[in-house]
Amino acid sequence: MALYVLCSVRLVRIGRWLRSGEDLHYVRIQSLQLAQNLVVMTEATLKTHLGRSDGTFNDLISDRNLDRPLRAAIQSYKATKPLNSVEALNGNLSSALESLSLTTDDHEWRAIAISIAHGLRNKFLHADVESLDFYSKPKDFERVLAALLLAVAAVSTL
């Protein structure tokens, strides 16, 4: 859980750096480190969620017991390729998040997904990520994490 808090804090800082005009090379390095941490954390989370002790990242995201919104979000993240412009990448990720938000009846999750999608559309990470209480609803942890993975993908290709 400590790694999750560290990743959340770093995600918010990256958003602030982008808004303040920080050197993009520095932001890119920080984003790539964050993406690596999130992938490691996602693997551990998925193993716990699925009750498995083994398996590669590909095995885990293909597991039929994984709920559809989470599987779709992680597969979208995994399939993200660098595009010619940040705007194009953000547009694609925003669309993916908005589509993902429609696959659940959980209004809080939908609001989180749409909030981050709107932040991406504006080329910034949404500052409200900082105020979310990730501990209040453990069942939503995996979905929030998937949304953060998508958000990190947007800045890790700068």
Image: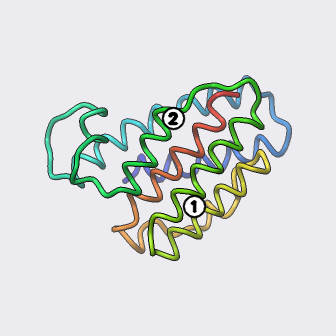
Identify the element where label 2 is drawn: helix
Q: How crowded is mark 2: few (under 14 residues within 10 Å), some or many (20 or more)?
A: many
**Viewer-proximal residue among 124 and 81:** 81
Residue farthest toward the right in the current orientation of the protein: 21
Is 26 drawn above or below residue 129 in the view shown?
A: above
Q: Where is residue 117 in the image (x, y as percent from the top left)?
A: 66, 55
Instruction: Give the vertical position of 111 relative to 60 (above or below).
Output: below
Q: From the image, which quarter does the N terminus lie in?
A: bottom left
The color scheme shown is: rainbow
The alpha-carbon separation of the residues under discs 1 and 2 comes to 18 Å
Q: Are marks 1 and 2 in contact (CB under 8 Å)?
A: no
Amino acid type of the residue tagged 2 in the rendering:
Ala
Residue, disc 2? 35
Q: Position of residue 154 (x, y in %)?
A: 64, 38
The amino acid type found where label 1 is placed reads Ala
Residue occupying the point 74% across, 36% down: 88
Residue 92 location (% of width, % of height): 65, 42
In this rendering, the label closer to the viewer, 1 or 2: 1
* In the displayed structure image, the side of residue 11 where residue 27 appears, left or right: right
Which of 156/97 is in front?
97
Q: Which of the 4 image quadrants contains residue 68?
A: bottom left
Q: Which residue is found at the position 44% from the left and 50% from the top? A: 4
The residue indicated by pointer 1 is: 113
